[in-house]
Amino acid sequence: IATMCFGHTHQDTVTLRRFKQLILKRPLGLSFVRFYYKNSSKLVLVCEQNKVFKILIVGLCKPILSLFAKTLQLSIFK
């Protein structure tokens, strides 16, 4: 979803990928990532088929993901 919102090389996408690698080291993190990929791919597929829905999802997710990524950059990934 971050890639859909920001693109592959955007700093927020890179930060969120780093966070994913960090949480994959823990069982709960691995479970979360599995759940996320199982469900997010369906959401992205719907967004690809429905431009209005994509605008809505990107509009909702982008500020939240950006804030989360900025928080990670200032705390965990200084």
Image (cartoon, rainbow, N blue to C red):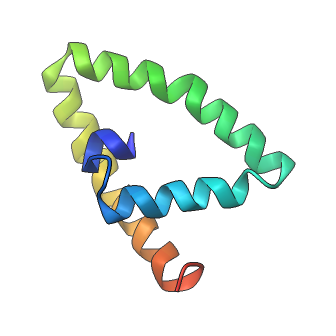
**Vertical placement of residue 13 versus 3, above or below:** below
**Vertical placement of residue 11 versus 52, above or below:** below
* Residue 57 placement: quadrant: top left
Quadrant assignment for the N terminus: top left
Q: Residue at x 45, y 65 (%)?
A: 68
Question: Farthest front residue?
Answer: 9
Left/right of residue 7 with respect to residue 18 in the rendered view: left
Q: Residue at x 27, y 23 (%)?
A: 47
Left/right of residue 73 with respect to residue 29 in the rendered view: left
51 or 73, which is in the foreground? Answer: 73
35 or 20, which is in the foreground? Answer: 20
**Vertical placement of residue 42 versus 3, above or below:** above
Point out residue 43 in the picture as x, y percentages from the top left corner: 40, 24
Q: Residue at x 46, y 24 (%)?
A: 41
Q: Number of callouts in the render?
A: 0
Point out residue 64 in the picture as x, y percentages from the top left corner: 37, 58
Left/right of residue 34 with respect to residue 2 in the rendered view: right
Q: Residue at x 60, y 79 (%)?
A: 76
**Vertical placement of residue 39 versus 24, above or below:** above
60 or 76, which is in the foreground? Answer: 76
Question: Farthest top residue?
Answer: 49
Point out residue 20 in the picture as x, y percentages from the top left corner: 61, 53
Question: Farthest right residue?
Answer: 27
* Residue 42 placement: quadrant: top left
